[in-house]
Amino acid sequence: MPELLLQKQQLRDIFILYLNTMAITKSAKKAIRQSATRKEHNIVYKDKIKALVKEARVLVSTKKLAEAKKLLPAIYAALDKAAKVGVIKKNNASRRKSRLTKLIDKKI
């Protein structure tokens, strides 16, 4: 959680830097603000996916396959939600789900 706060602060600092140096028109400044906000939202989705996938891979490597199988629905939900809101593409989500399922099934 502290990492997320640090990232938000860094994004805001970058935003202020851009506002002061790059954007001239009002619409350009607004576009930068929107971009920073969207980036914050996207980071939340991507971090959740990364954490879940990492946890599943650790479980597989430690031979806890039943627990890894139980984690799959949560991973599927996170990937589908990210694809639905446009953080990742639909085929990207499908590919990740397929590869992770194949990894777990191969170890069984």
Image (cartoon, rainbow, N blue to C red):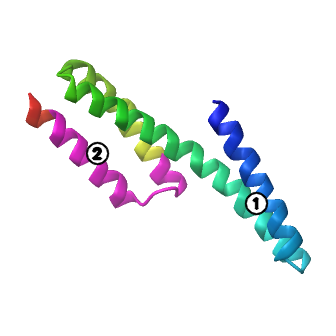
User: Does residue 92 belong to the magenta stretch?
Assistant: yes
What is the x, y in percent for residue 26? 91, 75
Question: Where on the picture, by quarter, is residue 52?
Answer: top left
Q: Residue at x 85, y 74 (%)?
A: 21
Q: Are marks 1 and 2 in contact (CB under 8 Å)?
A: no
Q: Is 68 a magenta residue?
A: no
In the rendered image, the quadrant that contains the N terminus is: top right
| Residue stretch rendered in magenta on the structure | 82-104
Image location of residue 23, percent across then percent down: 84, 76
Q: Based on the displayed image, in which of its 4 quarters is residue 19 positioned?
A: bottom right
Which residue, given by chain and number where applicable, does mark 2 sit on? 97
Residue 87: % across, % down: 52, 55
Seen in the picture, residue 14 relative to 70 is either above or below; the reply is below
Closer to the camera, 59 or 89? 59
Identify the secondary structure beneath mark 1.
helix
Q: Name which residue lies at 19% across and 23% down.
A: 65
Q: Place residue 8 in its image quadrant.
A: top right
Q: Assign the magenta stretch its main secondary structure.
A: helix
Which mark lies nearer to you, 1 or 2?
1
The residue indicated by pointer 1 is 14
- Residue in view at x 42 percent, y 46 percent: 80
Horizontally, residue 91 falls left or right of residue 46, namely left
Quick one: label 1, few (<14), some, or many (20+) residues within 10 Å? some
Question: Tag 1: residue type?
Answer: Ile
